Image (tube, coloured by chain):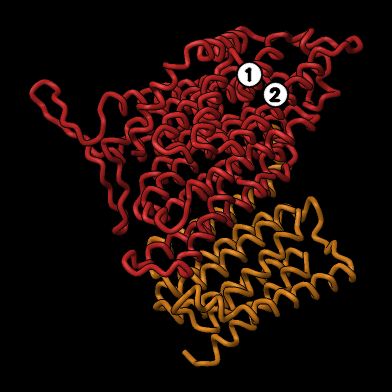
Amino acid sequence: MNAILIWVVFPLIIGGLLFLFQSKRRLITLIGLGIAISLASLAWAFPVGKVFMLGSWNFEITGQFSVYGRQIILTQGDWPILTLLYLMIAFWFLGSLATNVPSTFVPLGMVGAAMIVVGISIEPSFYAALVFEFVALLFVILLSVPGRPLSKGVLRFLTLQTLGMLFILFAGWSFSQVDVNVIDTAILARPLVMMGLGFSLLLGIFPFSTWFPMLAGKNDPYLTAFVFNLFLNGGMLFGLDFLEKYAWVNEYIDILGAIQVVGAIMLGVGGVWAVFQRNLGRMLGYAMVAEIGCALLAYSLGVQGLSMYFALLIIQVFALAIWALALHLLYTQTQDLDYHAVAGIARHFPLLAAGILLAHFSLAGLPLLAGFPLQWALGSQLAQLDSYGIALWLLLGRIGLASGGVRTLGVLFARSEEMPEKAPLKYLPKVLLILGGLALIIFGFSPHYLIHVGEYLSLALQ
Amino acid sequence: MPEILPTLAVGLLFLTALSLLLFEDWRLSIGALALQYVGVFVLVTESWPVEIAVVKLVAGWMSVAVLGMALIDYSEENGHGDTLNLSGKLFRFMVAGLVGLVVVSLLPNVLTWFLGATSRQGLGGAFLLGLGLLHLSLSTSPIRIIIGLLTVIAGFGILFAAVEASILITTLLAIVNLGIAFVGAYLLSISSMEIAK
């Protein structure tokens, strides 16, 4: 049995089949959810490369697949990533049952996840740039809902991802031409600049982060947050894999130091702009800018930071999903996420307001919530390494994001004129919001579970 | 292949990219884009055998056909007029001229980055990259952005073909080209589609 057939070809086929039955939205969501959970469980129970006994029958899941002489390779250590990726999409599929997102969500999400698996396992790794371009094209279709005006953010996303693909492709090719034994630093500068530009475009590193708030301000919050979560973290894993493959570059340039500075800038930009936002969707966009910064900071700390990166990622999945679900439900009531349209809405929908605020403050690292222990640990490690300036940026970024949250709190609880009658929330959204909110509080009190899981996940990249 | 052909192809690429920038009439744009892929094909044959280089031409023309079909429907609903006035066209012409000068002056650098590329490939590829980027920076409508992206990819394709002859990359870039055209067609049609339930 081949791992690529299980975790790539099978979900691709299922995604294609589900696409044909779009009229049965609930059914395809349940099927997609079941398959995503099964694939995650399979990755956890049957790691690639191990021999298993089923009665008298021995079988092994092999991890290599060849396409035109190039390899797609899943190794024994990749099971945590596969489990995480498919659990992530299962989580989003589950949440979509409480929304009215288009029926293309599950098929495109499933195909996108399978493509991301290809992206992080293809050799030579620069081919992944093309794979991520395909994922971007899929997500452009997902974000462009028929009958609704096309947002400029979608076009910006497509443009920057396409340019990013070209830069990474060229950088990867240039690296493959460099003779490791006779390196001229002047020649090395060229692919390094290309690589930096390529990944900046792919991950929306400042100043290419403009599409975050543009997307989040005008598109469906649930779809946007899903794209943020899956695409950007897939891109991040690709970037980490790329850096591992070309680890020798570290001998010539302090890449981790550069990543740390970029992370601090992203945190600062996200935090500062969050203070001035007057739209809940755009606020989510800037929170994501800061999250990318946080992830880069964690990665820059080496092995210990890697486990923190994955722990932060788990918090991000929970917080983003709850925030986006609440915003989506709010949008269906108000048709607008500007502050003036949602003023006083907490009096009518306290659960939605609680969901938005809990998720926002968790990402901002407010004490007693899920993000706090990890942000604290991140800041402490930076201080231990004498990176006080970077730690200060982390603090400022978090204060900025929290200030944005306080403004949102004020708006949501503001006294407003009598509002027109709103449809009450259904049972499922209420349950999901309560469970998600509880998870954010529980993780805040017992962060060691998260760190433990983060350590497991980080094994895949070591 | 006659020696003069690649030189003519460079001229053709500059003219097609310029007309894409200056004229917004969809029929002119589709025609210019189709011609652009002929120029790309000629320059790529300097590095690749004709039977592989023809992939660029076929994929390009298929993309043009997809966009053209979508534009026929779109223009019936939204008109197909040229929205740029004379001063706008003049401005774009001057900026395109500047980009052309920059490309010519940077040609030696381009050739050191893409070792193995001929000066004609360097010029043709860099013209398309430069004018495509200019197109992207000056446009906001979906179709213009899609045309800008296709132009940039075509320019990169010429330069990359000079250094890498992998069949897989050629195939994947052709699929990306087609994918962008399909997405462009989809983006043009969504405004007239039924509202999603």
Q: Which chain is red?
A: A
- Residue furthest bottom in the image: B3
Q: Chain of mark 2?
A: A
Q: Which chain is orange?
A: B
In this view, the residue in front, A417 or A384, is A384
Residue depicted at x 62% and y 9%: A430
Which x, y percent locates residue B29?
A: 71, 67
Residue depicted at x 33% and y 64%: A180
Q: Tell me how far mark 1 sits from mark 2, CA to CA.
A: 7 Å
Which x, y percent locates residue A241?
A: 40, 45
> Marks 1 and 2: CB-CB under 8 Å?
yes
Crowd tier of the residue under label 1, counting other residues whose Cα lies within 10 Å: few below 14, some 14–19, many 20 or above: many
In this view, the residue in front, B136 or A164, is A164
Q: Looking at the image, how many numbered discs can be counted on the residues?
A: 2
Residue depicted at x 57% and y 31%: A226
Instruction: Please say whether residue A325 is visible from this viewpoint.
Output: yes
Residue where numbered disc 2 is placed: A402
Which x, y percent locates residue A68?
A: 31, 58
Say if A407 sits above or below A432 in the image.
below
Identify which amino acid the numbered label 1 is placed on.
Leu
Which x, y percent locates residue A407?
A: 79, 22
Residue where numbered disc 1 is placed: A366
